[in-house]
Image (cartoon, rainbow, N blue to C red):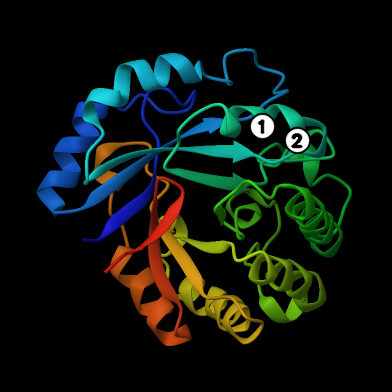
């Protein structure tokens, strides 16, 4: 069965989607879904870190072969132990590790890009990602490697492998050695140029020993569930990477 492995409902501070609406849309599309609510510890806004116990209490009744329960952890060095405790003490199906903050600045904020070149901000982003990947052994997949391109304040925010190949190679080598999946996040794949620009990263992941990718829409509303999954599957096929989803923290075939 095909899965959308990255979906946010109302436990995420930036989503108002009821789980019933998510389930209805997934059923219409014939998809399985994994709910992956945001957990960004040490966030300056106090309402961002959700109550994990309440999450399982409310959503356990929905859990089945087509509906799995995960989490998206915001990886930060200073939150390593707190994030580890969350994963260790709960029975998640799937854990995404993502970079949302760099040097205590949330990436979507203009402040992160001020007075710095694209080369400087992207390199620092990848340095932070690599540092976290070294210690975050308890994640299953590295989330949206191109996240920074969503918010970058440059005339051309696209991520090109050739511009940052040294940094990206270090990340891909480590992910491959640790047998982590690399997410193909479909949020930006509506633009065909974006898919073409990202493809060399996934090809390189395979060349460096990577085996698995997860595919997720990063949906925050029902109409976004399943968006561009076919494009992501075509990318995975072109790179000879296995599409998987995680159940009880173990990879399952995604198709």
Q: Quadrant of the C terminus?
A: bottom left
Label 2 neighbour load within 10 Å: few <14, some 14-19, many 20+: some
- Picture quadrant of residue 157: bottom right
Label 1 neighbour load within 10 Å: few <14, some 14-19, many 20+: many
Foreground residue among 17 and 176: 176
Query: What element does badge 2 sit on?
Result: helix
Image position, residue 44 (x, y; %): 72, 19
Q: In the picture provided, is 67 more to the left or to the right than 123?
A: left
Furthest-left residue in this view = 28
Query: What element does badge 1 sit on?
Result: helix
Residue drawn at x 73%, y 67% as measured from the top left: 174
Residue drawn at x 68%, y 26% as measured from the top left: 41
Q: Is residue 112 above or below residue 87?
A: below
Residue drawn at x 52%, y 19% as measured from the top left: 50
Q: Quadrant of the N terminus?
A: bottom left
Determine the CA span between mark 1 and mark 2: 5 Å
- Picture quadrant of residue 88: top right
Q: Which residue is mark 2?
A: 80
Asked if residue 18 can be seen in this view, the reply is no
Q: Which residue is mark 1?
A: 83
Residue drawn at x 49%, y 79% as measured from the top left: 196
Question: How many discs appear?
Answer: 2
Foreground residue among 140 and 231: 140
Q: In the picture provided, is 199 more to the left or to the right than 112?
A: left
Q: In the picture provided, is 124 more to the left or to the right than 253?
A: right
Find residue 224 and name its label: none
Q: Is residue 153 above or below residue 167?
A: above
Circle 1/circle 2 CB separation < 8 Å = yes
């Amino acid at each position: 069965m095909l899965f959308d492995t990255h979906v946010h409902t109302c436990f995420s501070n930036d989503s108002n989607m009821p789980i019933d609406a998510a389930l209805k849309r997934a059923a219409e599309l014939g998809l399985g879904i994994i709910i992956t609510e945001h957990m960004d510890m040490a966030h300056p806004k106090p309402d961002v870190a959700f109550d994990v116990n309440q999450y399982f209490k409310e959503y356990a009744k929905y859990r089945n072969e087509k509906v799995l329960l995960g989490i998206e952890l915001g990886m930060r060095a200073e939150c390593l132990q707190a994030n580890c405790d969350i994963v260790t003490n709960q029975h998640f199906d799937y854990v995404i590790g993502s970079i949302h903050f760099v040097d205590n600045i949330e990436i979507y904020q203009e402040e992160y890009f001020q007075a710095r070149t694209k080369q400087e901000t992207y390199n620092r982003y990848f340095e932070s990602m690599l540092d976290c990947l070294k210690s975050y052994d308890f994640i299953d997949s590295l989330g949206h490697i191109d996240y920074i391109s969503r918010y970058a304040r440059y005339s051309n925010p696209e991520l090109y492998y050739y511009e940052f190949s040294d940094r990206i190679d270090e990340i891909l080598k480590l992910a491959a050695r640790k047998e982590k999946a690399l997410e193909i996040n479909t949020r930006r794949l509506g633009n065909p140029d974006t898919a073409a620009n990202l493809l060399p990263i996934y090809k390189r992941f395979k060349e460096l020993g990577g085996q698995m990718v997860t595919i997720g829409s990063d949906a925050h509303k029902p109409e976004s569930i399943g968006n561009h999954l076919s494009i992501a599957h075509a990318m995975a096929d072109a790179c000879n990477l296995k599409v998987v989803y995680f159940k009880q923290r173990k990879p399952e075939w995604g198709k």
